[in-house]
Amino acid sequence: MNEKPDQKLRRPRVPGPAQYVLPELPYAYDALEPHIDAETMQLHHDVHHRGYTNAANRSLAALHDANEAGDYTAVKSLSRDLAFNLSGHVLHSIFWPNMAPAGEGAEPSAALSDQFRLDFGGLERFKAHFGAAAMSVEGSGWAVLAWAPRGQRLLVLQVEKHQNLTVQDVTPLLVLDVWEHAYYLKYRHRRDEYVRNWWHVVNWNDVSQRYGVARGHDSMEPRSEVLPEVTGAAAKRATDDES
Ligand SMILES: [Fe+2]
């Protein structure tokens, strides 16, 4: 079942990042006992997930202010912070409703069962595969069951840590290859020149189409609402607008 995006989702009155909100647990802290203890659930949700959510909002606000100021010197570190914290927020937001008290989790739907059969040879084979992926993640991380729309199939993935400079909740719209094979013959070490010139060949029709399709997707994670207070340069501009 897919939910429509939250009707509360609106952009702030002045340009600025929408704010991510810590979702409430859909059950009591002790609801998953004895398999997952109440204290773990409380710390995990109230401390760890809250930390990701708040820091993701701070990272977005800082990036927004940097953009307003035209000062991109901190983009690298802020992008790293955003990837770490927003991926943490998104994955935990999926993790909580992915669980239910023992006996209440039902069975996979007929459609999902068919897909498991197609892609893994059945539910039990999928569970073995997923379990092996979870057991062998190097260091901290996640096992993820994902739908791959181009291949029209399910994939089991390992996510090491969860940031590695990407956010686990996005649809790519515009990508630029900065591996050396993409520019070294012509530009040698001058990646900056390649990046600047690349804008001449961007196909905005294609990007716009992708944006339209992405906006048409249903979302299971409607966790944003109006930014209660706009920070930095945007706040100053809003004040100026009012005066
Ligand atoms: Fe966690």
Image (spheres, grey):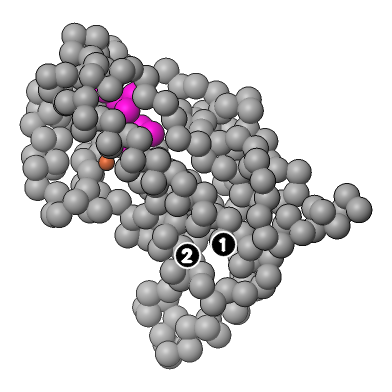
Q: Is residue 134 visible?
A: yes
Q: Which residue occupies the foreground of this view, 216 or 86? A: 86
Mark 2 crowd level (few <14, some 14–19, many ≥20, 10 Å Cα): many
Q: Considering only vertical position in the picture, is 95 above or below 160?
A: above
In the picture provided, is 43 more to the left or to the right than 66?
left
Q: Pointers 1 and 2 in contact (CB under 8 A)? A: yes
| Residue 125 picture quarter | top left
State how far apart marks 1 and 2 are (Cα). Answer: 7 Å
Amino acid type, residue under disc 2 in the picture: Leu
Quadrant of the displayed image that contains ligand 1? top left
Image coordinates for residue 188, horizontal then vertical, percent? 43, 90
> Dot 1: within a 10 Å radius of its alpha carbon, few (fewer than 14), some, or many (20 or more) residues?
many
What secondary structure is marked by label 2? helix
Q: Which residues are magenta?
A: 91-99
Mark seen at residue 63: 1
- Tell me where residue 29 appears, x and y as whole percent: 28, 22
Q: Seen in the image, is 40 located left or right of residue 73?
A: left
Which residue is labeled 2 in the image? 78
Closest to the observer: 187 or 233? 233
- The percent coordinates of residue 191 (x first, y second) are 48, 83
- Look at the numbered disc 1 and give the secondary structure of its residue: helix
Q: Nearest the camera: 111 or 106?
A: 106
Among numbered discs 1 and 2, the one appearing first in the sequence? 1
